[in-house]
């Protein structure tokens, strides 16, 4: 683990930035790192599925704001101005899904409480290889492969021709950069309840993804049959076991329907 931390630090230095090493779950350490270094912008790219240390960062940013006189900003990775109200009232049959929307709302509410501007990045399927020290490929792609290896073929989980927002890795990175530039230049990109962002260039049909993945896996000898069929209960059981989840949540891990649009991102000057 320590070797990986140092490697991440070295990667940051390559881009001319100075890495800070501190306990990201310790309130005192977080305050010390942010306040003493007069940090006013935080990209929080970890733990999107729980509200644990985000408040510590927002509190520290609020203190840094008081000391520097500058607006402070908390960018959280997880569309329209009504999305907050939709999520606030949303109830999911899946515990993880319910927690996820609650975390988004609590980030926004905590930011408003402490006077820190918050920005929420919505999930998207990513294509293209990552160049950082995190995931190199989209987590949905990994889940489809893991499920296919366990079940012996690629299955579609839902019968509807659902589509999901998609983006190239550079689209995602460029939107992060564009928001940062807008902040540094003194502009006021949408934040709080009006700060939901999606770096999407369009949508892709899950059916097309499944068929392409099945063809590639069959070509490599990972599975024997490239035909995509509807998953039955036995297949769902195998897929759920491979993904470490329950059967009713397999579809949320490698499927689903997205109707988000990337309007707020475009208002900052970003374009896919």
Image (cartoon, helix red, strand yellow):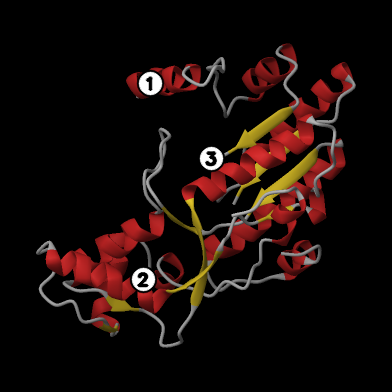
Q: CA distance from mark 1 to mark 3?
A: 18 Å
Question: Residue 4: percent from the left, percent from the top?
Answer: 36, 24
Q: Earlier in the sequence, mark 2 or mark 1?
A: 1
**Left or right: 157, with 17 as reference point:** left
The quadrant where residue 260 appears: bottom right
Q: Distance between the Cα atoms at labels 2 and 1?
A: 33 Å
Percent across and percent down for residue 154 are 25, 74
What residue sits right under mark 3 in the picture? 46
Q: Which residue is mark 1?
A: 7
Q: Residue at x 36, y 19 (%)?
A: 2
Q: Horizontal and vertical percent for residue 179?
A: 71, 41
Please report whichever mark, 1 or 3, sits nearer to the chain's N-terminal start: 1
- Tell me the quadrant of the picture where the C terminus can be found: bottom right
Q: Residue at x 41, y 88 (%)?
A: 159
Residue at left 80%, top 21%?
64
Tell whether 266 sits left or right of 123: right
Q: Which residue is mark 2?
A: 209
Would residue 238 be found to the left or right of residue 164 on screen?
left
Marks 2 and 3: in contact by CB < 8 Å?
no
Q: Secondary structure at mark 2?
A: helix
Where does the image place residue 24, in percent across and percent down from the top left? 57, 27
Describe the element under mark 3 as helix, strand or loop: loop
At label 1, counting other C-alpha atoms closer than 10 Å, the crowd grade (few under 14, some 14-19, many 20 or more) is few
Vertical side of 96 occupied by 187: above or below:
above
**Point 41% across, 74% down: residue:** 206
- Per the image, label 1 sits on a secondary structure element best described as helix
Q: Is residue 2 above or below residue 158?
A: above
Earlier sequence position, callout 3 versus callout 2:
3
- Asked whether disc 2 touches disc 1, contact meaning CB atoms under 8 Å apart, the reply is no
**Measured along the vertical axis of the image, is residue 61 above or below residue 232?**
above
């Amino acid at each position: 683990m320590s070797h990986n931390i140092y490697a991440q630090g070295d990667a940051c230095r390559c881009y001319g930035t100075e890495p800070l090493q501190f306990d990201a779950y310790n309130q005192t350490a977080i305050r010390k790192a942010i306040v003493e270094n007069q940090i006013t912008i935080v990209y929080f790219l970890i733990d999107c599925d729980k509200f644990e240390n985000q408040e510590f960062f927002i509190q520290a940013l609020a203190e840094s704001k008081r000391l520097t006189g500058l607006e402070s900003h908390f960018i959280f990775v997880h569309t329209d101005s009504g999305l907050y109200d939709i999520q606030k009232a949303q109830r999911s049959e899946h515990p993880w899904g319910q927690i996820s929307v609650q975390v988004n709302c609590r980030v926004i509410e905590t930011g408003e409480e402490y006077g820190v501007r918050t920005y929420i990045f919505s999930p998207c399927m990513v294509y293209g290889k990552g160049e950082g020290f995190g995931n190199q490929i989209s987590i949905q792609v990994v889940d489809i492969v893991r499920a296919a290896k366990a079940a012996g073929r690629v299955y579609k989980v839902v019968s509807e021709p659902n589509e999901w927002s998609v983006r190239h890795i550079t689209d995602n990175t460029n939107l992060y950069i564009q928001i940062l530039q807008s902040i540094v230049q003194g502009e006021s990109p949408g934040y709080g309840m009006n700060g939901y962002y999606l770096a999407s260039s369009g949508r892709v049909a899950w059916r097309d993804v499944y068929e392409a993945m099945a063809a590639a896996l069959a070509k490599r000898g990972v599975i024997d049959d490239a035909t995509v069929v509807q998953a039955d209960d036995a297949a769902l059981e195998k897929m759920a076991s491979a993904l470490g989840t329950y059967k009713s949540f397999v579809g949320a891990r490698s499927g689903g329907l997205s109707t988000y649009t990337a309007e707020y991102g475009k208002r900052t000057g970003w374009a896919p």
